[in-house]
Amino acid sequence: MSWNEVVIEVARAHAEALSDALMDMGALSVSVEDADEGTADEKPLFGEPGMVPTEAAWDRSRVVALLDVDADPAPLVFDAFTSIGLQQAVEFTTRPVADADWVRLTQSQFEPIHIGKNIWVVPSWHEAPDPNGLILEVDPGLAFGTGSHPTTRLCMEWLEAHPAPGKSVLDYGCGSGILAMVAKKLGAGEVTGVDIDPQAIESANLNAERNRCEIDFYVPDDFGASKHGEQRFDIVVANILSSPLKLMAPMLSGRVAPGGFLTLSGVLARQAEEVAAAYAPFIKLGVWAEQDGWVALHGQLGQDTAPPPRADSSLNSGE
């Protein structure tokens, strides 16, 4: 089967409405791109993980609609323009989309990821590069966490550098469950994961089963009502975002057992001080490591000072 793409350049104010109209008129999919991509006027739109960018389009946006090869694009585009009140001349171009093995093409974009000294995140369709490593079989999915983002990598590297055989671990904001699984495979005893998204809990349970990890995953309400409702953990790790991390400072700190560790990521380097300040009444946090502008913070409950930073932490070493 083959398709055609219809390419339309519009102002930012009309990009979202036109996209919706094209879908209503029968387009199979619609995407919005920067019409200035590849030029000096190209403008990146991005946010922190899990956040929607404040702008959904560019000043000069390129709306790309996928149509069946037999569909006549002219009346479809005309009707879409008319439905949103655009009276300007309808101009568009078309380009063919060749048939392909989309499953194989998609899979080819995801290779095994090497993290820390000995951790490998391996999609199910790949062989593990190092069968003696700590292998996590995780396929890209809807839940955040495959090890590709610096915040996830930082937390995984922290867990690898602080193995806690037999200790209890809480992964708050567990997403795909990858941090909980790393802790379990490193020898942790009781491991628990919590996430507000039921779909993440479903994904985490499937991943844990695939990787033969015994982990309890909960949404927050079920967590509070579970056997872990009042539990304090030897290690609490939370890879979320700076704003919710600050709001959750009393709760997350209260989940750390005396002498236990708290590790946070999802924090930009410029946000480290304000996040640490939110936790200061409960536990002193310091930067453990930085990667691509993101940091991991950690501290030990009941200690006067945070543990020393990792040796390669550029934010602390002044490098």
Image: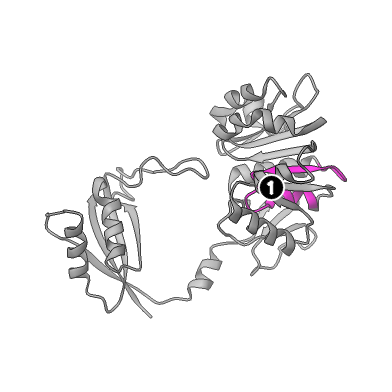
Measured as percent of width and height from the top left, residue 106 is found at: 51, 67
Measured as percent of width and height from the top left, residue 162 is found at: 79, 40
Residue located at (58% from left, 60% from top):
140
Q: Quadrant of residue 5?
A: bottom left
Q: Is residue 233 magenta?
A: no
Where the N terminus falls, by quadrant? bottom left
- Count of labels in the image: 1
Where the C terminus falls, by quadrant? top right
Q: Reply above or below: 148 against 73.
A: above
Q: Quadrant of residue 2?
A: bottom left
Residue located at (33% from left, 54% from top):
32
Q: Is residue 177 magenta?
A: yes
Instruction: Count neighbours of disc 1 (C-alpha within 10 A) and say few if under 14, some if 14 to 19, many if 20 or more.
Output: few
In the rendered image, which residue does mark 1 sit on? Answer: 222
In the picture provided, is 33 more to the left or to the right than 109? left
Q: Which of these two is toward me, 15 or 305? A: 15
Residue located at (63% from left, 32% from top):
248
Q: Reply above or below: 129 against 46.
A: below
Q: What amino acid is at disc 1?
A: Asp
Where disc 1 sits, the SS reads helix
Q: Quadrant of residue 212?
A: bottom right
Q: Which of these two is toward me, 277 or 308? A: 277
Q: Which residue range is magenta in the image?
A: 163-184
